[in-house]
Amino acid sequence: MRIGVFVCWCGSNIAKTVDVVAVAEAAKSFPKVVYSTDYKYMCSEPGQSMIRDAIREHKLDRVVVASCSPRLHEPTFQRCLGEAGLNPYMVEMANLREQCSWVHERTPETTEKAIELVRMAVAKVAKNEPLSRSRMGITKRALVIGGGVAGIQAALDIADAGYPVILVERTPSIGGHMAQYDKTFPTLDCAACILTPKMVDCANHPLIDIWSYSEVEDVQGFVGNFEVTIRKRAKSVDESKCTGCGLCLEKCPVKGIPSEFDAGVGTRRAIYRPFPQAVPNKPVIDREHCRMFTAGKCGVCQKMCPTGAIDYEQQDEVVTEKFGAIVVATGFDLWDYSVMGEYGYGKYPDVISAIQFERIMNASGPTEGHIVRPSDGKEPKSIVFISCVGSRDEEHGYPYCSKVCCMYNAKQALLAKDKLHDVQTYVFYMDIRANGKGYEEFVRRTIEEYGANYIRGRVSRIYPDNGQLVVKGADTLLGKQIEVRADLVVLATAMKPQPDAKELARKLGISTDQYNWFSEAHPKLKPVEVLTDGIYLAGACQYPKDIPDTVAQASGAASKAICLFSKEAIMGEAMIAYINEDTCVGCGLCAEVCPFSAIELVEVVDRERSTRENQVMKTVARVNEGVCKGCGTCAAGCRSLSARLRGFEGKQILAEIDALADMVKVQR
Amino acid sequence: MKYAYFPGCSLESTGKEFGESTRLVAEALGLELVEIPDWNCCGATSGHALDHTLSIALPARNLGIAEKMGLDVMAPCAACYNRMRSAEVELRENAKLREEINSNLEDPVLGKSTVRSALEVLASPESLSRIGERVRKNLAGLRPACYYGCLLIRPPKVLGFDDPEDPKSLDEAMKAIGAEPVDWYFKNECCGASFGVAKSEIVVKLVGDIISNAKKHGANCIVTACPLCMTNLEMRQAEASKQRHENLTMPVFYFTELIGLALEVPGVRKCFASHLVDVNPVLDLIDRNLISTART
């Protein structure tokens, strides 16, 4: 056995507190070490070639790199060993940076600790065994959950690359929030005009299947090999017969149901499609309101339908499908401001949310785009917009910034002035956060060309007075209390996670942050990945985003899936858990503690107790190698030492502890 | 029911009518009030602004005595209630401060007694039904604007017996005696509080806003549960009227006075003598209404 030790300075990161030369010198005396040196940047190409050369020159068979955390550079040095002809798993890293130089001052003890860390790594690497990674097949088909602009973009990109996609959407139509908007900032493109072509592309794409009115029920498996159970809710309309003529929509006698798509400012009937450009453009029956289901009689739509497409007997269909990758694009929800007594507990009809104002401004909305007050249908002469309603507000809502409100406040103020020339708009803001391409210019345009009166301050109260609303607040630039009389007040309510985000995260085995936004794998460098391989995030299900950021991330998520599908097979991890089935007693503790649900209990033949005549079965744990992340929780928990972790075997850990104990003994 | 009664300074001076009417109404309802012996200042205004420990220690002494009496505290004055309740909550949550303060107290605070405002006690469902049973004079025709101010309902995390944005307890109490409280929007606006001394122009503006909104919504009087609100609302309405060129004359009552009136508690009418704004127009209105209802 010939071990080489390579001590890194990490520039001055390690070298300024640890005497790296002394560490390299001390390592020379450790058991089996035949070569030891130090270098300024071990991870650089010259550093790596130094390791490769030393392996050849000194016939090294094991290597210790004393540098940073293995989380950062273990793959780098594993590759380096592989290039030099060694098994990549014959390298160990001693973390002299995060666990030593960064947390201590420059003292002799710091260098001593560094020497101890290296000695432990040397003891461990001596017990290392060559490991290999397994090959696994890939189902080259993607599931996209959520049919908003994020899901639409991801589905189109994956399908355009030649891989089939199932796009699952909970509501009757794809389109998401973007389909509700009137215009988009800062270009004032009509949202529908730029979105509906993409929706139609989805519908017409030979490789995209849109499953609307459907939800994910269960997710099993692992990267390349997911098995997903999806409930296709009964639409009560046979899509193969329905031509989308819309006759049923006009004749349904159950009217006045608040329309979800119109955010409650418009109504729909019991049989409905959310909006005229819906995709698929075929209605569904809302069984909670339909008289056929609530009272057992009516049948008007069935009588009217010229193609006999109405089917009250239709059942939910639950199917299980295989996928190689999953794009999560479930979007956001909006905070309900009716908890705020300051703004009237949602009781004043002319205090509305910004999404309701979008519907009022939208030509396909309940007022056909005429800006009027909900209370009396009159045109407002004065509109107050209030930003940060529930955002940046720990008292009522969330501490975070919802990111898009400053921009849509400006957009709505501009469009209101554009439509109603004699309206006066006011925007109460905390800070104007307009940091996107063309955004700051857009806000200036709203203020300078469209005369919006921007007031820096919070609104403390809104109350009705003589048919108007009095908005009381602070102007913190003037240092005065002010009152504005408004005909209409529009609240920029916070973006919040979908109410069932936590539930979906549980099904997918992915994590969420404290608010229930889905957590990315790394906040800087892995913004579309999650900690579970093969699952990618797109859009505002991760955190509030505007449309360009959402679309960019959706394409990012799609490219991750495409990248996966472009491979013939997936290489599994080498350092994962395994079970000694001979000693396993099937207690199931490992399966219970596994954070990735990678362990299941299976029945196997008990070789010890079975005879030729009598086969005895027993329960043992089994690791799903595609799912295991090598965290070692099972190995730590196993009472019979049957669950083990490759690369962290008991003998390796004990060797490290022994090495440390020897050092302590010597020092004493 | 029996409470350790904390009058504080105002209920023996500027808010004497509040103290007196509270005692009379409590007696009429069978609530026994035992004054905390040798009570001291609650620490409002200067105390709590200058020294946090002192602001807790001052009410803590009163709380300690109440605990020894084995009683919960009733503090009618909104400022006293706010200070004592803040101290109660902080002493429960902050063990270190509790030890420090208790080491200087003859009667330590162990957290057994709780502090309630007179409004909280008298507007509880039990009290309201008891009041309802004892009403002898229905106050129909009285359309009070129920004014809560700030100290009685904020901060909600500490006080929390009523909704800070749309409080209802005073309105409920008024309904129980047959009055018809108006819907208005300045229930919990600031009256200017102690700016009444330092910067009275602020108080004039705020009092003007409050009374004007009450008038607009058809109120014929204002009802309050705070001596400081009473002082500001009564003292500054003449000046506010002048400034706004608007008749803002409006009688202001403590809610306990009106309950006493409805229960026909002997002696309660004496309280009205010390009001700065003439309350007789409203009292006459009630009496006329009574007569007319009796006739029909």
Image: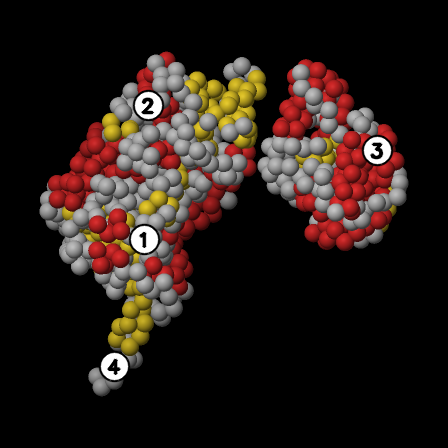
Q: In this view, does B174 lie to the left or right of A620?
A: right
Identify which residue is drawn at 72% across, 42% down.
Answer: B140
Residue A648, can we see it? no
Query: Which of these two is toward me, A24 or B121?
Result: B121
Label 3 crowd bin: few (<14), some (14–19), many (20+), radius 10 Å: some
Label 4 crowd bin: few (<14), some (14–19), many (20+), radius 10 Å: few
For marks 3 and 2, give the CA distance. Answer: 58 Å
Mark 1 sits on what residue?
Answer: A253
Task: Name the chain under label 2.
Answer: A
For marks 1 and 4, give the CA distance. Answer: 67 Å
Q: Is residue A205 above or below residue A382?
A: below
Question: Given contact means CB atoms under 8 Å apart, are the residues at marks 3 and 2 in contact?
Answer: no
Q: In this view, does A360 lie to the left or right of A173?
A: right
Q: Is residue A583 above or below residue B35?
A: below
Of the residues under marks 2 and 4, which one precedes in the sequence?
A: 2
Query: Which of these two is toward me, A427 or A467?
Result: A467
* Secondary structure category for the residue under label 2: helix
For marks 4 and 3, give the CA distance. Answer: 99 Å
Q: What residue type is labelled 4?
A: Gln
Q: Which amino acid does label 1 sit on?
A: Pro
Mark 4 sits on what residue?
Answer: A615
For marks 2 and 4, give the CA distance. Answer: 83 Å
